[in-house]
Image (cartoon, helix red, strand yellow):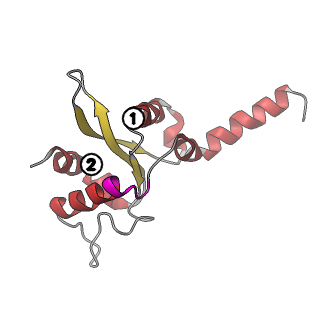
Amino acid sequence: MTGLEKLIEGNIDEIASGIPWVLIGKDQTTRGYKQWTAVVLYEDESCADDIEFRKARILLNDDSNAILINSYHNAWVGVDEDGGYESIKDIAKRIKAGYDNGWCRATHTDISMLKPKQALAKHLIKLYNYGVF
């Protein structure tokens, strides 16, 4: 089993459910090698803790080719026509093709947009502090 297949196996529910977004890329290891890694990002109140978003930004700094996927929005990932999960190998092939071809390539702006409620609240607080309200 390849490193990407192991990563998918450990995150299959998140990748195939269509609920969270999953950032997949290669990060630097302590020995200088690059290994596949994933960061799972939820858009709701459960993402109030910024740890996963910090991890996502670090991954994007390490790998500008990282892709941001969600099987609801990216039908080519994860779910077969019967609503079940595809095989790990099939999902790995599709994610690798997406990574290699630049499909759904992520940016720091994409990551920031996943936190609309928190970002809006911070912006409103700044406006309030400047006396706009």
Residue ranking furthest to the top: 30
Going from the N terminus, do you reach mark 1 or mark 2 first?
2
Tag 1: amino acid: Leu
Q: Secondary structure at mark 1?
A: helix
Q: Which residues are magenta?
A: 99-104
Determine whether the residue tagged by mark 2 lies in a helix, strand or loop. loop
Image location of residue 77, percent across then percent down: 32, 63
Residue 14: where, in percent of width, then height?
Answer: 33, 52
Q: Are marks 1 and 2 in contact (CB under 8 Å)?
A: no
Mark 2 residue crowding within 10 angstroms, few (<14) / some (14–19) / many (20+): some
| Marks 1/2: CA–CA distance | 17 Å
- Tell me where residue 113 appears, x and y as whole percent: 58, 46
- Residue pointed to by mark 1: 59
Picture quadrant of residue 76:
bottom left
Looking at the rendered structure, the kind of residue marked 2 is Asn
Q: Which residue is mark 2?
A: 11
> Toward the viewer: 13 or 77?
77
Image quadrant occupied by the C terminus = top right
103 is within the stretch colored magenta: yes
Q: Is residue 7 left or right of residue 119?
A: left
Q: Farthest residue toward the left?
A: 1
Residue at the (42%, 40%) spot, across then down: 64
The residue that appears at 42% across and 57% down in the rendered structure is 19
Please state the horizontal and vertical placement of residue 70, each as a whole percent of the image: 41, 58
Quadrant of residue 103 within the rendered picture: bottom left
Q: Which dot marks residue 109?
A: none
9 sits left or right of 98 in the view? left
Residues packed near mark 1 inside 10 Å, few (<14), some (14 to 19) or many (20 plus): many
Q: Residue at x 26, y 78 (%)?
A: 82
